[in-house]
Image (cartoon, grey):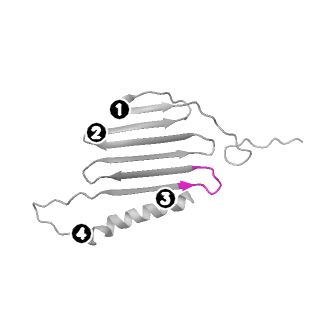
Amino acid sequence: MLFKALLLISAAAVAMAQYGHGYGAPAYGHNDYAQPIPYQYGYDIAGDHGEFKQTRQEHGDGHGNVQGSYGYVDAHGISRQVDYVADGHGFRAQVRTNEPGTESQSPADVELHAQPAHVAQPAYGYGAPAPRRHY
């Protein structure tokens, strides 16, 4: 399902890059600039069996100010959530995660809040140990 969604998004981006520039765009003179347009988009993707979740949200006010977030949770409960702002004061992000090997810190105006992972052990399937066979 994820592959199909990514394939569809990629195909749409290629089509817009190739053909989207000629439809309904106003003609501006050499001294005219296009007016910024506010926008908002996002998506949520989940595995068919709950094995993962991805999310992405972003909006811009049309004046160069952008706010957004993206994140995921995998089948083992490992997660990352990134909230960000880009405006006249620069880019700032806050990251919340329980990924192994991370620790709380604030490099380059990015706040990283690490928590211990509470890894769920699936009963079978992806990431589960192979069943023991007794002969």
Who comes first in sequence, dot 1 or dot 2?
A: 2
Query: Separation of disc 2 and disc 3 at Cα?
Result: 30 Å
Q: Residue at x 88, y 41 (%)?
A: 134
Q: Secondary structure at mark 2?
A: strand
The answer for how far apart the CA atoms under marks 1 and 2 are is 9 Å
Contact, CB < 8 Å: mark 4 with mark 3?
A: no
Could you tell me how far apart the alpha carbons at marks 4 and 3 are, in whole angstroms? Answer: 27 Å
Residue receiving disc 4: 25
For marks 3 and 1 on the same chain, the one whose residue lies earlier in the sequence = 3
Q: Residues within 10 Å of mark 2 (few under 14, many from 20)?
A: few
* Range covered by the magenta-colored residues: 45-52
Specify the amino acid type for callout 3.
Leu
Q: Image point 37% across, 56% down: which residue? A: 40
Q: Secondary structure at mark 1?
A: helix
Task: Look at mark 2 in the image and give the residue it sits on.
Answer: 90
71 and 5: which one is in front?
71
The tag earlier along the polypeptide, 4 or 1, is 4
From this viewpoint, which residue is outermost toward the right?
135
The residue that disc 1 covers is 109
